[in-house]
Image (cartoon, rainbow, N blue to C red):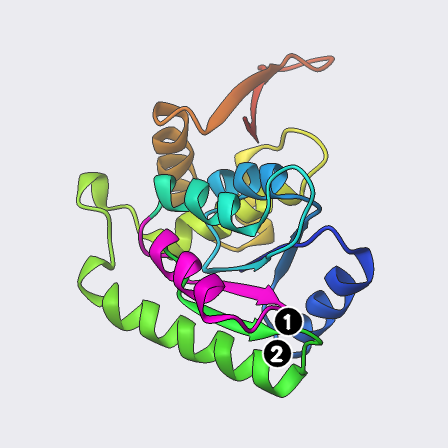
Amino acid sequence: MILIIDDNETIRFTLKEICEFSEWTAVEATNGKQGVSLFEKLQPDLVLVDYHMPEWDGLKTVKEIRKRDKHTPIIILTVEERQEIANKFIEAGATDFALKPIKAPDLISRIRLNLKVAKLSNADKDAFVDKGINPDTMKKIRHYLFSQDNAVTINSIQSSLPIAYQTVHRYLHYMVEKGEVEVLCDYGSRGRPKNKYQLI
């Protein structure tokens, strides 16, 4: 999953089209603050960040992401070619740059390269040590929850992904413990109440 953080709607649309053409799921944020919030919820594989944005600019956004995660690749989108700007971003934790106007072949190759490097550097961390949680499975469940308008049952997650019921249950329990997911009790009209889950 790729997180796009840009205040320009046309550019977000173009970036999403490029990502989807290459079969990457893309999620959009209209500013740095919203982007960091989505980053925490979804833990994407890569982030595209615009430099010039109101409120939080790209530099502030990169610093905030790096406070939460040291390794996810961050590609900066900018019209600036000055070395001092590049140096500031590298110091803040950016991993690459793509000059605007965006050229699809260039951006796709940069994304592929950054994802490949991230995968190699994470090869020894394929599973979280605690409770045998796999990051890829966690991302799938997190993304499914994010895409729902309402709280959902384990059955609906399990049938949509598909991941075994017991696995979904274990991951949701883990996410509830971590404070990422809340459980809502649906009493319905008859029968036992059902637990439903949603991202906090």
- Tag 1 and tag 2, C-beta contact below 8 Å: yes
Q: Nearer the viewer, residue 64 or 89?
A: 89
Residue drawn at the location 62% of the way across and 87% of the way down: 105
* Three-letter code, disc 1: Cys
- Is residue 148 something one can see in this rendering? yes
| Rendered image quadrant of residue 34 | top right
Where does residue 95 sit, x and y in percent of width and height? Answer: 39, 66
Residue drawn at the location 42% of the way across and 57% of the way down: 88
Residue density around tag 1, few if under 14, some if 14–19, many if 20 or more, within 10 Å:
many
Where does residue 115 sit, x and y in percent of width and height? Answer: 41, 71
Question: Disc 1 designates what residue?
Answer: 19
Instruction: Say above or below: 41 vs 53.
Output: above
Q: Give the secondary structure at mark 2.
A: loop
Q: Give the secondary structure at mark 1.
A: helix
| Rendered image quadrant of residue 198 | top right
Instruction: Say above or below: 81 vs 147.
Output: below
Q: Nearer the viewer, residue 146 or 51?
A: 51
Q: Residue furthest right?
A: 10
Where does residue 50 sit, x and y in percent of width and height? Answer: 62, 58
Locate the C terminus and report the quarter of the image it occupies. top right
Residue density around tag 2, few if under 14, some if 14–19, many if 20 or more, within 10 Å:
few
- Is residue 164 something one can see in this rendering? no
- On whether residue 108 falls in the magenta region, the answer is no
Instruction: Tell me the tag on residue 22.
Output: 2
- On whether residue 89 falls in the magenta region, the answer is yes
Residue drawn at the location 32% of the way across and 56% of the way down: 71
Is 29 on the left-hand or right-hand side of 122?
right
Residue drawn at the location 58% of the way across and 85% of the way down: 106
Instruction: Say above or below: 157 vs 105.
Output: above
Which range is magenta? 70-92
| Rendered image quadrant of residue 145 | top right
Is 16 on the left-hand or right-hand side of 182?
right
